[in-house]
Image (cartoon, helix red, strand yellow):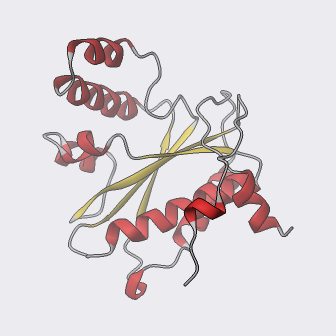
Amino acid sequence: MNDVLKAIEERSSIRAYTAEKLTNEEITALVKAGLQAPTARNMREVHITVVDGENPILAEIDNEKNMLLAANADEETKAKILANPNNFYYSAPTVLILSVDKDFFWNKLDAGIAVENISLAAQSMGLGSLIIGIINGAMSGAKKEYFAKALKFPENYEFAIAIALGHRNTEKEPHEIDLDESVCYI
């Protein structure tokens, strides 16, 4: 099996990381993988903000996410959300936040392709990753402009998706697939 197909087959969402930081070379390779993804009409509108896992902005985003989720939940769920010891990025040493030109129709699709490239590159490098969408409410809510400025989004850009990256501190089996249930040929 070739290396790309192997990375796709073995990739899974990792929710526990060691404290070991990624090297500059690893981060650069991952960012390049994202930026080399195809984009609609070759717009290349995806922007990547590299955030150290210890940067306080991540805790601010996590707090906003928790407040919004709790505000729309029943009492039992609210208590679980507020007591949850895990942050949205599971203390990964690096988080990439992808933003896109908010006026380009295909922007979120392009960001999805980029983040998948990053995830597969991480897998091929022996790293773990977790693609993150749960912060969308926090990133598009009342603090949208504050977060965009803090994360240095280009003008007219908005949050699309994020990915946590680091050295695995757990293993997880990849998803099982059922070709008969998920595919038809016509």
Q: Residue at x 69, y 36 (%)?
A: 172
All told, the count of numbered labels is 0
Observer-nearest of 119 and 5: 5
Looking at the picture, does residue 45 appear above or below residue 175? below
Observer-nearest of 66 and 24: 66
Q: For this view, does 5 lie left or right of residue 56?
A: right
Residue 18 appears in view: yes
Residue 31 appears in view: no
Please state the horizontal and vertical placement of residue 73, each as a whole percent of the image.
21, 24
Looking at the picture, does residue 169 appear above or below residue 143? above
Q: For this view, does 37 lie left or right of residue 21?
A: left
Which residue in the rendered view is the most extreme toward the left? 142
Residue 60: quadrant of the picture: top left
Looking at the picture, does residue 3 appear above or below residue 16? below
Q: Residue at x 65, y 63 (%)?
A: 179
Q: Residue at x 42, y 78 (%)?
A: 44
Please state the horizontal and vertical placement of residue 103, each as a whole percent of the image.
20, 73
